[in-house]
């Protein structure tokens, strides 16, 4: 198992992410290919955060382990195991690739599954996405237009830097297109 640091490749390939942040964090912002299977629910996270501020990291870690133990730990571990089986080429992800994803990774390892995590977590992935977007807007954009059926899509797809927006949107192209699975039926013309 290799923990993930090639953020652009992870983002570009829509790699599945098991996001272990609390639901409130996930609902505020998440990666498109992420599912939320939190280590702690919102209330547990709030209690651990308050403990951290008042008593320090060791006390917060102890409280977290106390809150998520026994049957609760077993049921959450089972959910992660099922997600790992469903997404064998995915990664664990927490806010900054720290405590929570490492704990889940360790519990999975104890259950016999070696599953990688995103080094730097959601924050690193988000920063990589912002940086890639900033770089893209600096590049010249060429728009290709023309009549239906004249080969625009083939031209775009033949370019190493071409982006087929219709393909990404699963747009149903004109009925004479060579790929019938993506074509419109005569009834829709």
Image (cartoon, helix red, strand yellow):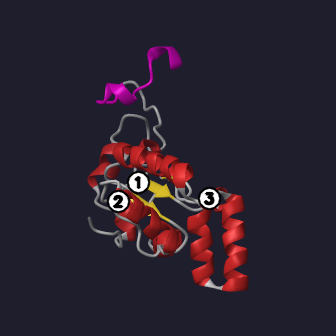
Q: Nearer the viewer, mark 1 or mark 3?
A: 3
Question: Disc 3 or 2, which lies upstream in sequence?
Answer: 3
Relative to residue 167, is residue 134 depicted above or below?
A: below
Q: Give the image location of residue 178, x and y in percent.
A: 29, 30
Q: Nearer the viewer, mark 1 or mark 2?
A: 2
Q: Which mark is residue 115?
A: none
Verify CB contact (< 8 Å) between mark 1 and mark 3: no
Which of these two is toward me, 99 or 147?
99
Q: Is residue 187 magenta?
A: yes
* Rendered image quadrant of residue 154: top left
Residue 129 visible in the displayed image? no
Q: Residue at x 37, y 49 (%)?
A: 84
How far apart in space, not on screen, are marks 3 and 2 (Cα)?
Answer: 26 Å
Q: Give the image location of residue 161, x and y in percent.
A: 33, 62
Query: What secondary structure is found at the residue carrying circle 2?
Result: helix
Q: Residue at x 36, y 73 (%)?
A: 5
Query: What secondary structure is found at the residue carrying circle 1?
Result: loop
Q: Which mark is residue 26?
A: 3
Q: Give the image location of residue 52, x and y in percent.
A: 66, 80
Q: Residues within 10 Å of mark 1 (few under 14, many from 20)?
A: some
Relative to residue 113, is residue 185 depicted above or below?
A: above
Q: Is residue 38 magenta?
A: no
In magenta, the rendered stretch is 176-189
In the picture of the structure, the residue carrying the numbered disc 2 is: 110
Residue 180 visible in the displayed image? yes
């Amino acid at each position: 198992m290799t923990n993930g640091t090639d953020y652009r490749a992870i983002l570009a390939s829509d790699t599945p992410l098991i996001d272990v942040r609390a639901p409130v964090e996930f609902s505020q912002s998440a990666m498109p290919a992420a599912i939320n299977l939190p280590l702690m629910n919102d209330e547990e996270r709030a209690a651990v955060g308050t403990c951290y501020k008042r008593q320090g990291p060791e006390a917060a870690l102890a409280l977290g382990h106390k809150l998520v133990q026994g049957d609760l730990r077993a049921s959450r571990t089972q959910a992660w195991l099922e997600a790992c089986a469903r997404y064998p080429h995915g990664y664990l992800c927490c806010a900054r690739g720290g405590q929570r994803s490492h704990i889940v990774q360790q519990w999975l390892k104890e259950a016999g599954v070696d599953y990688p995590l995103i080094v730097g977590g959601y924050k690193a992935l988000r920063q990589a996405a912002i940086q890639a977007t900033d770089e893209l807007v600096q590049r010249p954009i060429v728009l290709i237009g023309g009549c239906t059926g004249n080969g625009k899509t083939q031209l775009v797809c033949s370019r190493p830097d071409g982006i087929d927006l219709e393909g990404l949107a699963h747009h149903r192209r004109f009925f004479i297109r060579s790929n019938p699975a993506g074509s419109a039926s005569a009834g829709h013309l």
